[in-house]
Image (tube, rainbow, N blue to C red):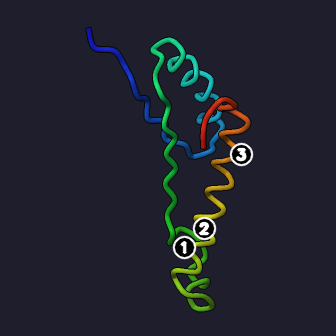
Amino acid sequence: MTTIQNILFPVDFSPSCVAMAQHMKRAATIFQARVTLVHVFDLYSHAPVQFYVRSISQVAEERQKLAREKLDSFLKSDFRQANT
């Protein structure tokens, strides 16, 4: 019998995503599965004027840092037992 061992949970920090976190934790408990959170951000979705002031790599680094902070915060509040 095949069981679920890994659950991929895409995170966008929306209210529905936050509400779904409890269901992911429950499913992981039931199946004794590992939950992997994934967050994708679009580098070009905000203020293209940034690229005139700073390099793409600087903007990307800042956006990645902000996304990581949000994900870490999400982990601490919704997945308290998770390893980052």
The amino acid sitting under disc 2 is Arg
Residue furthest bottom as drawn: 52
Q: Which residue is mark 2?
A: 63
Q: Position of residue 50 (x, y in %)?
A: 61, 83
- The tag on residue 73 is 3
| Rendered residue at 45%/14% (across/down) | 31
Q: Position of residue 19 (x, y in %)?
A: 64, 28
Asked if disc 1 and disc 2 are in contact, CB closer than 8 Å, the reply is yes
Near mark 3 (Cα within 10 A), the count class, few <14, some 14-19 or many ≥20, is few
Which residue is disc 1 drawn over?
Answer: 60
Q: Earlier in the sequence, mark 3 or mark 2?
A: 2
Q: Position of residue 14 (x, y in %)?
A: 63, 42
- The quadrant holding residue 7 is top left
In the rendered image, the quadrant that contains the N terminus is top left
Q: Could you tell me residue 56's position as x and y percent?
A: 51, 82
Q: Amino acid at mark 3?
A: Ser
Amino acid carrying mark 1 in the image:
Ala
- In terms of secondary structure, where does tag 2 sit? helix
Number of numbered labels in the structure image: 3
Q: CA distance from mark 1 to mark 3?
A: 20 Å
